[in-house]
Amino acid sequence: MKILFKVIATAVLLLILTALLLFGYFNLSGPEPREDVDLGMTFSSRYAEALGLNQREVYLALLDDTGVKKMRLPVYWDLVEQERGVYDFSEVDWQLDEAAKRGVEVILTVGIKVPRWPECHIPQWVGDDALSRREGILPFVETTVMRYREHPALAKWQVENEPFLRFGICPPLDVTLLEDEIALVKRLDASRPVLLTDSGELSLWVHAAARGDEFGTTLYRDIYSEKAGGYFEYPIGPNFFRFKEKMVRLFTEQQHFSVIELQAEPWASGWIANVALEEQFKTMNERRLRENVDYARQVGFQDIYLWGGEWWYWMKVTKNYPAVWETGKELFQTYGK
C-alpha cells in the first residue's frame, strides 16, 4: 500500500512539475514580432445590423477606408434559404462582387455553424433531428459552392466555424456530417483549400487541423467569464500557441496555420450596445488593439484576421469615438497586403 501511495504521489508531483515548467515556458519572452504579416478581417452583416448599422455601409467603409485586402465572410444558411429549396444569395453576391472590384481575397464560410452568435444558424423549416440537418445542409453547401467556385474574389473555403468547440446554441457535433461537408466542398472545388478552425485557448487543435488543408485558430486576450469571477486575462504568452503548433505538426500533416479570429472588440458582461464604454474599454480600446496585433505577430503565423470591425464603426458613428477605427486603419496600412 505504501509503495502504491509513493507511486501515485510521485506521478502527481511530476505532473505538477511538468505543468509549472510548461506554464513558465508559455510565459517566457516571445520572439520579435513578425513583420511580414497580412492582416485581414471577418465581417458579419448580421452583427452590423444588430448594432443598428447599415451593413452595406459598414462593409464598404471597411473595404475603402481601412484598405483591408483579406476578408472572411459567413454565408448564413437561415438567411439565404429561409424556405426549403428557395435561395436568396443577393447579399453574398454583392459582398463578393464588391470585394472583387477592389482585389480583396475572400474566405467564404459555409455550414451550420458560422461566425457570430448564436453560432449555429439553422432555418426554421429544418427539423430538430440529425437527419433533418444533414438532408438540409448538404444541398445548401453544394448550392453555395457551385454558385461561387468560379468567383474571382474567392480564395478559400471554410467549412463550419470551430466545430469541435462546444459554444453557442448548437446541436451536438456530428463528426460524420462534418467530414461529409469537407469532402463535398473538395469534390466540387478541388482548386481551393478548405480551412478548419478551432479555439486557441480551449482546444488542442488536432481534430480540426487533421481534417483541413489549412488551420486557423482564434486568439483572445481579455474576456468576461462568470465562472472566472468577471473580467479575466488569459495568463499565457505567445509561446503557448507556438507550442501547440509544434504539437500539431508532430501529430498531423498540417503545414498552414493562421490566426483566423484575433480579438479586436470587447468581450463584455452583456450585449455590447447596452454596456457602458468604460466597461467596454476593460477588454478593448485602441491601445489593446495594438497590443493584440503585436501579440499575434509574436505567435508567428502570417495571416491574422481581426474580429470586431463592425464595433469599430459603431463606436465611430454612434459614440463619436473614432480612435479605434483610426488605429485599425493604421494597422491595415502597415500590415494589410
Image (cartoon, rainbow, N blue to C red):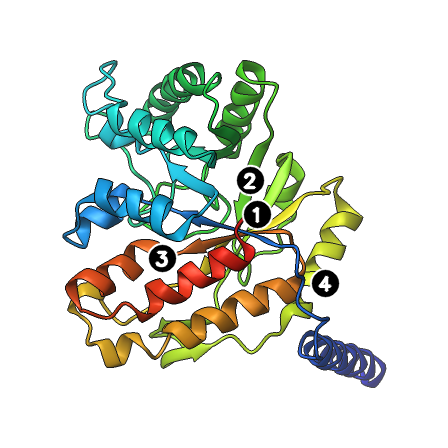
Q: Position of residue 2 (x, y in %)?
A: 82, 86
Residue indicated by mark 1: 216
Question: What type is the residue that disc 3 sits on?
Answer: Gly
- Label number found at residue 196: 2
Q: CA distance from mark 1 to mark 2?
A: 6 Å
Location of residue 54 (image quadrant): top left
Mark number, residue 243: 4
Residue 189: where, in percent of width, then height?
55, 18
Residue drawn at x 52%, y 51% as measured from the top left: 336
Q: Is residue 90 left or right of residue 142?
A: left
Q: Amino acid at mark 2?
A: Leu
In-image side of 20 versus 327 (left or right): right
* Nearest to N terminus: mark 1 or mark 4: 1
Residue type at numbered disc 4: Phe
Q: Can residue 132 be seen by looking at this rendering?
A: yes
- Give the CA distance from mark 3 to mark 4: 27 Å
Query: What residue lies at 51% left-to-right and 75% top-to-bottom?
Result: 234
Q: Is residue 298 above or below residue 66?
A: below
Closer to viewer: mark 3 or mark 4: 3
Estimate the x, y position of residue 94 in percent, counting from the top left. 29, 28
